[in-house]
Amino acid sequence: MMRGIAVSPGIAIGRVFLKTEQNLDFAEKTVTSAEKELARLAVALKQAESELKELIVNIGQKLGHEEAEIFESHLMLIDDPELIEPIKEKIKDEKINAEAAIAQTINFFSQMFAELDDEYIKAREADIKDVGKRLIRILSGQGKSTTELEENTVVVAIDLSPSDTAQLDTAKVLGFVTQEGSRTSHTAIMARSLGIPAVVGVGKELSVSIKQGRLVSGQTIIVDGNGGQVFINPDFETEHEYQQKREKYQQEQERLKKYKNKEALSKDGKKVEVCGNIGNIRDIESILEHGGQGIGLFRTEFLYMDRDTLPSEKEQFKVYRQVAEKMDGKPVVIRTLDIGGDKELPCLDLPKEMNPFLGYRAIRICLDQPDIFKTQLKAILAASNYGNIKIMYPMVSSVDEVKSANRILWECKKELAKEGKGYSQDLEVGIMVEVPAAVMEADIIAQEVDFFSIGTNDLIQYTIAVDRVNEKVAQMYTPYHPAVLKLIKKTIDSAHQAGIWVGMCGEAAADELLLPFLLGVGLDEFSMGAVSILRIKELLSKWTVEEAAEVSKRVLKLHSPDGIEDYLLKVAR
Ligand code: PEP
Ligand code: MG
């Protein structure tokens, strides 16, 4: 058994197909005429261009525009002087053949990127390598590698390049397993959009198993894309267990499909919203596929992470606009920078703190360094012309913070108007309610904003004084603590009295046991990771508001987390 990152849900049981690297044999040669090599390179670039254009059309039809974009980026790479010029220089200066010049240049970039521990850059590294392989293959006169697959295949590889995946007959592929890769690697993205279970990043054990002959094509393999486990040559019991799991999962998926295009309604017809949480643009597709009615939380931190400089207004605008357009009028709640705590930001060079979760973070940084805040607010405002965008401030602990943030927002609006840029006049502004102080002041804060979104991930840690990332106290970290549940109720009551709506974007929004409680206390919007959306829509349809209110009343009379959990388990549907 091997363990990796479950990046595309579902269970596959099939036969291993080892996809080994296509052997690109070429010898490094010194050449007498650099001109001749440069001409060969030019021909190869032309050929690569036409291959890529063909792929973009094919993939676009097969998998949609999003996936074809990978090859659009390859097309840009073969036209990018930063990559192509060094290759030409090498040919001219070192008088080596084009294949060797390409291989050396790609290696150089690849090593440079490998030193950066950044998922995004790693994916770009894969793009560069893929382009390099394509060029060398063309120059060496080798044809495209098309792989004949048997039915019920699980593709196992060290890593799969986008081109590798594009050439597979995916109708015959049941699953993917790779040694390398992350949630944002191409294999992961491709697998998710094809709906094929995948586990990536299983580590060195995979290549060792191949080397030692323990992993060969044709063996039976189980891929658990929900739990991240991979079994090779499973025993009878394990295979039987996973066959049943697969059946159950498939039945559940079938059953849940009917909720995709439905509104989220309680049994007696009360309308609520079930939305998705995203960390980048790529997550949107999955949210929509799972019937998300909007984005309840866009964590914008990724735009700022793993880089030396802060993202410009223009750069941010492009991203926010794209998100708004992709959501096509559905609500998109963009949370302003929520950095600090367990999220570091190299481009700000923040000093280490004794108590980072209680320290210089989120809205505190933004109010202290308004330039950073204004750049983001202006980008969001400008993007609000292109969809239904809302702004949300994180980590609010007092009404003064909200007033200060709104004042800065107002300044941004004035500046934009001066610059002749428009913004949506009815853009809503809200806060994350994730600090107990904000709950206690919720009635006052509600006068200043249009909505609340309860961040239970932090609310739990600040309420019970239990670090959300400390395993030693993990058993104390629970949404079923009566104090947490009372704070949730108080937040919702205060908001409704002030006439504003309340969502929840912490993990508790997708907690199946908690659902009747949340419906019962009147939560208006639930926001969560894509895979939970359909199930929560289904569960909502099983409760009337009255039944749910009865559950929440009972829960609020209980005083131990375990007792509450037991009770919720007993009434669960
Ligand atoms: C939360 O605190 O519940 C939340 C949604 O925000 P994050 O997990 O990003 O802190
Ligand atoms: Mg939080």
Image (cartoon, rainbow, N blue to C red):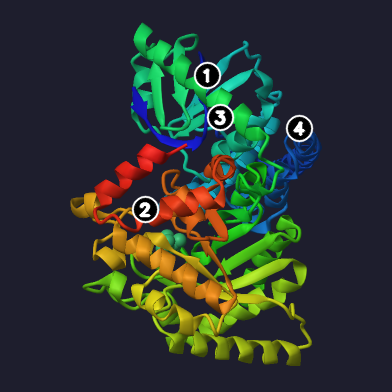
Labelled disc at residue 554: 2
| Label 2 beta carbon within 8 A of ligand 1 | no
The Cα–Cα distance between marks 2 and 3, rounded to whole angstroms, is 76 Å
Residue 169, quarter of the rendered image = top right
Residue 508 percent across, percent down from the top left: 42, 53
Q: Mark 2: which secondary structure?
A: helix
Residue 433 in sight from this viewpoint: no
| Element type at mark 1 | helix
Amino acid type, label 3: Ala
| Residue behind mark 4 | 62
Residue carrying label 1 = 247
Which quarter of the image is occupied by the N terminus?
A: top left
- Depicted 476 relative to depicted 332: above or below: above
Q: Amino acid at mark 1?
A: Glu
The disc, 3 or 4, on the residue closer to the chain's N-terminal end is 3
> Residue at (35%, 58%) from the top-left corner?
556
